[in-house]
Image (cartoon, helix red, strand yellow):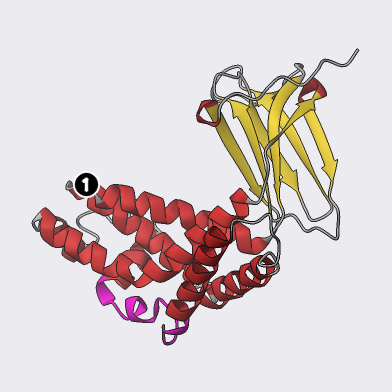
Amino acid sequence: MQQPHRKPAPVADHIHYEQPLNERIRTFLRLEFLFRQASRYLAGSSEWDSRNTLHSLLEIMHIFGRADLKTEAMKELDRHIQKLAKLEQNPNVDHSLLVGILDELDRLIDQLHGINGQIISTLKKNEFLSAIMQRSAIPGGTCDFDLPEYHFWLKQPAEQRTRDLSGWLHHFDSIAEAIQLILRLTRDSAVMRPEEAPGGFFQKTLDPNLPCQMVRVAVPAGAPYFAEISGGKHRFTVRFLEVPVIGERPLQTRQDVSFSLGCCII
């Protein structure tokens, strides 16, 4: 007889695993990670904090150099406005909350419209950053003898380094805020529901009329397995894997796994 679903643990006791199902959300998730990483190291005062902040900045610049992300973010913001505007006539919706979100979306679109040209156009002309980016492709290429100017900059007072780094990261403030809101709305669109994965395997077919942007899986923090998610616009699969010893190949658990699942459709 099938066992009843166990009540999911409180959210704070979960580890969340996310899988984007389109390239736009995939890029936004990577940028969210890099913005958080840069912010974390920017708060530090050591040379290594400055190195890590700058490394995050260069990775952000690399992503922006491959696509017109300002346009991508504006399209996504506009898509959210169109979707949410349809809810204005729904009596069951918190209208004050809805109006606040729509105003925030409009404000961010206006801010992005106000940016002339590419977001990284000024940073691309910065010879100091360009030299470090070129050497970063070489293992150990940013050591002292390779980049004496970088070595000199790292020896400056922490306040000066933080001021420089903050100024460079400031170029991304508007789009970072836009991406943060887009991902928050995407995550909040999913209701986390209890599911079972017999023998550690779960698969779900997606409704093509309700495109899913991202899959979220929540597993109790003390569980001896992690979730590996793969999928596309038609279906996705979740496998729960155990790690006998770190460094060895993970194996699919034989346990029946209770977890929470959210399909972000917005």
Q: Write down the quadrant of residue 243 in the picture.
A: top right
User: In the shown orientation, is residue 248 left or right of residue 83?
Assistant: left
| Quadrant including the C terminus | bottom right
What residue is at 62 percent from the left and 28 percent from the top? 219
The residue shown at (56%, 75%) is 74
The picture quadrant where one finds residue 145 is bottom left
Q: Is residue 149 above or below residue 111?
A: above
Q: Position of residue 244 (x, y in %)?
A: 61, 17
Amino acid identity at mark 1? Gly
Q: Residue at x 26, y 52 (%)?
A: 42
Q: Is residue 241 left or right of residue 66?
A: right
Judge whether residue 117 is colored magenta: yes
Q: Position of residue 188 (x, y in %)?
A: 60, 49
- Above or below residue 250? Residue 40 is below
List the single residue furthest toward the bottom.
116
On the question of residue 245 being in view, the answer is yes
Specify start and end residues of the magenta stretch as a single range.
Answer: 113-128
Q: Give the residue pinned by disc 1.
A: 44
Is residue 222 covered in magenta?
A: no
